[in-house]
Image (cartoon, rainbow, N blue to C red):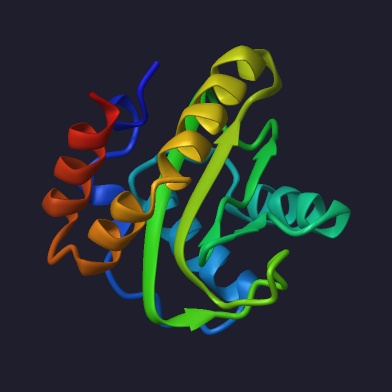
Amino acid sequence: MIVSDYLKEKFCLMELKSEDKAGSIKEIAEVLAKENKIQDKEAFIDDVLEREELGSTGIGNNVGIPHARTNAVKGFVIGFGRSIKGVEFKSLDGEKVNLVFLMGADPAELNLYLRILAELSKLLMDEAFRKALIEADSPSDVIGIIKKYEN
């Protein structure tokens, strides 16, 4: 299973306006909701923020992967947001986050959800991959970079 099968250009925000975790999650969720990828936007946001209370998904290296299993989503959804100045995410390394991948899956999609989370985490361990995403000029560049590194 590969990330680019689910992350589409229209789900990518190239400059998040928010400077905090909740705001950035809401921004990306808004895009996904407009594309009818979320059945209940408010419930989705609440579920993701509730998951964040268990521990930050700011995994280090300026990356955040907020996610939740939730009935507010049918199937699986992923969105991307980038912030050049950084978002305060209470990351494990104390650094701000520049790359945010927001994911949600209905509980029936647990296997898919875990496979994509693992694949994305593996990609994000590569410094060149992260740097390329930060330097991307457009959503099509983001998708192209992901496809390049997936192969």
Could you tell me residue 145's position as x and y percent?
A: 19, 45
Q: In this view, does 34 lie to the left or right of 29?
A: left
Could you tell me residue 59's position as x and y percent?
A: 63, 55
The residue under the point 64% across, 25% down is 106
Could you tell me residue 25's position as x and y percent?
A: 56, 63
The residue under the point 55% across, 32% down is 117
Quarter placement of the C terminus: top left
Could you tell me residue 52's position as x and y percent?
A: 77, 56
Seen as rendered, the residue at the extreme front is 127
The residue under the point 49% across, 56% down is 29
Q: Nearer the viewer, residue 52 or 144?
A: 144
Q: In this view, does 63 lie to the left or right of 123?
A: right
Q: In this view, does 16 lie to the left or right of 112?
A: left
Quarter placement of the N terminus: top left
Residue 19, compared with residue 43, is above or below; it is: below
Q: Quadrant of residue 22?
A: bottom right
Residue 20, compared with residue 46, is above or below; it is: below
Q: In which quarter of the image is residue 83?
A: bottom left
Q: How many labels does the image show?
A: 0
Q: In which quarter of the image is residue 149?
A: top left
Seen as rendered, the residue at the extreme right is 54
The residue under the point 12% across, 50% down is 140
Q: In this view, does 15 lie to the left or right of 24?
A: left
